[in-house]
């Protein structure tokens, strides 16, 4: 492939476009090994530029984050943690990991940070095992007067294993907005723990604090897990801390979705979980706008247990991703990011208000964060039909269960979407109103198709071709004003793939 050479000769004497040059050099290298992979990368950029990205859990990270991630650091094994490695030659990884931990602590005002988890699911497992080792295993070891697990007899080890497997967790019900790693039976968390749930109010969709307190007193869990994947309202962590203390539960908050809003100061005081929880977990790629990965923050009490993510849960960390996390945490500490965090909420509130004004059933009548939940039940369609039709019309978002959903987790009655990515592109209230209008027109026009047996289909639908064409036109018009990675000209690659 001569892509780089061609680019250099085509741009000789012209002003340097460093981002395009870097992109071309990277694609050139990839294409020399696999034109299909190179084509896939470019096509993904073309697609992401052609659809409004409203997936609540996605974003667009910076070129600096991507460069920190795409390099030789991936070649290094560094099991252990800073200064305590099971591999030689980890000096540079030590420096990078230390920096990422310091940046995370500074950003969130945390006492301790662990930046190795490969994902949010990993971060939760690291946190669960840190809590279990500290609260269950360590006291038994002390009673047995043993320091090392390898010194235990089989009977002693089995006693510990039985106790570890006999602990309770109380988390938000998956269908009310919790995450599958919060004790769902199909996830390992639901097998590790005797899992119990709290719920949102069936009528309002809002968390019922008294009910949470009651459930805590009924269940008396070891782990009280707060946090969500699909809940649009603020949570008062100061109250939940009091409730956790009443029953001696360890309070863990999974802020995977809204970490960027905390980092940017848009969720502060009683709405900032870091100030109240024993352990906080997060992803780094949603509102936080970093590389795909996980993060654990904790008090000093849990630090030594959290740092044992390897060997408890993970093997080697991903040094290249830790480097990208260090960059993302630094970016998230800037004034520009602070403004971004507030803007995400301003946009989601504008989008929710515009949808409500058009008669769309916005759950809880609005939002306090980056995300909006909509029920499409009253429109006579399922979430699946709505998701697929909107995608045909240029809007990418996902179906989601509503609290106590009658359609189940596959078809669902709802949609979940968010404003983190479109806000990164620079969109504002005017664009949110335009998006709400397109969405409302499509949703209201949608009819379920009939199955071959004459029943109403839950999956197939009838979408008016005129509405579809008009929506695509309007979406493209919005996107033309907010181009993703504008320095990169995908047209240049057309002749190669
Ligand atoms: N926790 C919550 C609340 C989430 O929403 C998610 C992902 O959607 C996760 C954990 C898992 O993150 P990952 O997909 O990085 O494993």
Image: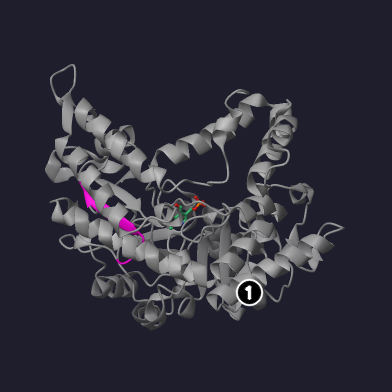
- The residue under the point 12% across, 51% down is 359
Q: Which residue is mark 1?
A: 303
Check the image and report above or below for 317 versus 469: below
Check the image and report above or below for 9 versus 154: above
- Give the camera-side residue of 257 and 392: 392
Quadrant in which residue 241 is drawn = bottom left
Q: Quadrant of the N terminus?
A: top right
Check the image and report above or below for 67 versus 206: above
Check the image and report above or below for 280 versus 2: below
Residue 367 in percent (x, y) is at 28, 63
Examine the rendering and report whether any part of residue 78 can be seen. yes
Quadrant in which residue 364 is drawn = bottom left
Magenta highlight range: 368-375
Q: How many labels were placed on the picture?
A: 1
Q: Is residue 371 magenta?
A: yes
Residue 243 in percent (x, y) is at 35, 79
- Give the camera-side residue of 369 and 26: 26
- The residue under the point 80% across, 69% down is 83
- Residue 258 placement, left or right of 298: left
Residue 40 in percent (x, y) is at 57, 31
């Amino acid at each position: 492939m001569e892509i780089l050479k061609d680019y250099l000769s085509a741009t000789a004497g012209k002003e340097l476009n460093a981002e395009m040059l870097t992109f071309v050099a990277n694609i050139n290298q990839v294409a020399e090994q696999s034109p299909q992979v190179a084509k896939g990368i470019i096509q993904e950029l073309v697609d992401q530029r052609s659809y409004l990205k409203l997936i609540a859990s996605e974003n667009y990270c910076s070129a600096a984050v991507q460069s920190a991630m795409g390099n030789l650091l991936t070649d290094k094994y560094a099991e252990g943690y800073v200064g305590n490695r099971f591999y030689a030659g980890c000096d540079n990884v030590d420096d990078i990991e230390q920096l990422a931990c310091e940046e995370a602590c500074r950003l969130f005002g945390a006492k301790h940070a662990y930046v190795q988890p490969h994902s949010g699911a990993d971060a939760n497992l690291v946190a669960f095992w840190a809590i279990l080792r500290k609260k269950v295993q360590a006291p038994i070891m002390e009673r047995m007067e043993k320091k090392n697990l390898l010194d235990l007899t089989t009977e002693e080890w089995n006693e510990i294993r039985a106790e570890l497997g006999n602990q309770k967790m109380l988390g938000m019900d998956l269908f009310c907005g919790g995450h599958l790693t919060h004790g769902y039976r199909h996830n390992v968390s639901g097998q590790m723990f005797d899992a119990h749930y709290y719920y949102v109010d069936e009528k309002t969709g809002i968390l019922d604090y008294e009910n949470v307190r009651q459930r805590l007193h009924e269940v008396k869990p070891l782990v009280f897990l707060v946090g969500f994947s699909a809940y649009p309202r603020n949570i008062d962590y100061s109250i939940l801390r009091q409730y956790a203390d009443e029953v001696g539960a360890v309070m863990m908050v999974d802020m995977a979705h809204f970490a960027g809003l905390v980092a940017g100061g848009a969720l502060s005081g009683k709405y900032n979980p870091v100030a109240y929880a024993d352990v906080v977990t997060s992803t780094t790629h949603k509102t936080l706008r970093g590389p795909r990965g996980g993060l654990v923050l904790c008090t000093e009490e849990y630090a030594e247990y959290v740092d044992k993510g390897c060997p408890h849960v993970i093997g080697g960390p991903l040094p290249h991703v830790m480097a990208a996390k260090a960059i993302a945490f630094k970016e998230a500490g800037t004034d520009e990011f602070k403004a971004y965090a507030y803007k995400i909420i301003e946009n989601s509130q504008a989008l929710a208000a515009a949808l409500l004004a058009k008669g769309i059933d916005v759950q809880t009548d609005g939002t306090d964060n980056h995300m909006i939940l909509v029920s499409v039940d009253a429109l006579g369609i399922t979430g699946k039909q709505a998701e697929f039709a909107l995608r045909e019309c240029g809007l990418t978002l996902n179906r989601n269960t509503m609290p106590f959903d009658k359609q189940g987790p596959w078809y669902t009655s709802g949609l979940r979407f968010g404003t983190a990515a479109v806000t990164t592109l620079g969109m504002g209230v005017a664009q949110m109103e335009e998006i709400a209008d397109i969405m409302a027109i499509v949703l209201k026009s949608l009819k379920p198709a009939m199955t071959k047996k004459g029943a109403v289909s839950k999956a197939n639908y009838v979408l008016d071709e005129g509405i579809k064409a008009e929506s695509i036109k309007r979406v493209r018009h919005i996107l033309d004003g907010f181009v993703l990675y504008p320095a990169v000209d995908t047209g240049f690659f057309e002749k190669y793939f």
